[in-house]
Amino acid sequence: MITIGITGTLGAGKGTIVDYLVQNKGFVHYSVRSFITEEIKRRNMPVNRDSMTEVGNDLRAQHSPSYIVEQLYAQAQASGCNCIIESVRTPGEIAALRGKPNFYLFAVDADPKVRYERAVLRGSETDHVSYETFIANEQREMTSDDPNKQNLRVCIEQADFRFDNGGSIEDLHKQVEEVLKQITYHRPSWDEYFMELANAASRRATCDRGRSGCVIVKDRQLLVTGYVGSPAGLPHCDEVGHLFRKTIEEDGSISNHCVRTVHAEQNAICQAARRGIALEGATLYCRMTPCRTCAMLIINCGIKRVVCERKYHSGAESEELFRQAGVQLEFFHDEIQHYENQ
């Protein structure tokens, strides 16, 4: 999930960027302005720039400098969609959002007279003011030593990307599109790259009870691959069905494990043995914590690092074996996967 915060001067075009991302890129919009407006109405105050400033500052002082954006971010997380939080105005808000994954801050600006004309055309509840009042309102929000209060100058300075909206809407859209290309492109790390290969290998698995794959790598070179499947020449589960055996797990639960197949890690190690490939010092990538048998084979063949996509719910014994043997064990994700979901 990508989270974009937008800051900028009054009437600069924050809403234009929001509309583009919502209508063309599927982003979900969350507005600080709307959040504060609802609170203003609840307090039976007039909806104007003075009330916006007073109530926004009061909420931040009562709770925290990042209170409003934290509330909006929680709503965004629940949606699970790429989101855009409009009208980030305090350094405290930025600091809180910086701690979230895949957060980017946009800032937009334009000539004051151009912005005023746009604000007049917009005609919102806070825009029915003279040019002098418009500039005065902006200056009031530009700087502050109080982290609870607006400081647009610092927010704009901290932006990851800045947009000049002095031209046409099409020009602004092009600027936004170029930035989106930058933030959505991700060159995978070596661990991500090899985990993707392990997942690709899993598609060769022949047991729908556990379609797992494995690759073993050394010095960033792929040595062998493996996937879940029956011993060579024997029927596959996908063809004849599973051969279940009840197993008592470490937590006391009972699982029906399919014992017709060889695990991906075991198959990869067997392939290395048949080809005379030494695995001393190698790294093994697999879907989840290897079982006890696989863990012992991994230790004995000299593999020194194991990278798993996630934890297996009954993998504590293997984790302890790796710890005692000095094998480095890492996980991409902290969530625990149960055997039934393999």
Image: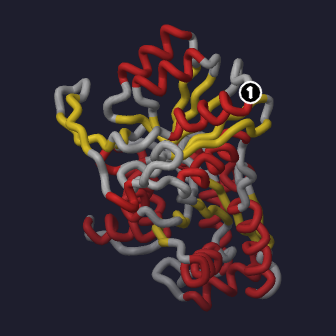
- Count of labels in the image: 1
Q: Position of residue 95 (x, y in %)?
A: 57, 42
Residue reaching furthest to the bottom: 121
Q: Position of residue 63 (x, y in %)?
A: 36, 43
Residue 269 versus residue 176 in the image, above or below: above
Q: Nearer the viewer, residue 252 or 155?
A: 252
Residue shown at the point (60%, 58%) measured from the top left: 141
Residue 322 image offset from top left, x and y in percent: 50, 16
Disc 1 residue type (three-letter):
Gly
Residue at x 48% of width, y 60% of height: 53
Which one is nearer the viewer's eye here, 98 or 34?
98
What colour-coding does the image apply? secondary structure
316 on left or right of 286: left
Check the image and name the residue furthest to the front.
Answer: 233
Q: Nearer the viewer, residue 336 or 16?
A: 336
What residue sits 54% from the left and 76% below the top? Answer: 26
Q: Hey, which residue is sitting farthest top in the picture?
A: 324
252, above or below 239, in the image: above
Q: Is residue 228 in view from this perspective?
A: yes
Kindly indicate the quadrant of the structure image that contains residue 137: bottom right
Question: Residue at the location (53% across, 45% down)?
Answer: 232
* Residue 65 locus on image (x, y percent): 47, 44
Label 1: state its secondary structure.
Answer: loop
Residue 95 visible in the snapshot: no
Residue under pointer 1: 276
For label 1, the crowd category at 10 Å Cα-Cα, with few meaning under 14, some 14 to 19 and many 20 or more, is few
Q: Say which of 154 and 256 sits in front.
A: 256
Residue 72, quarter of picture? bottom left
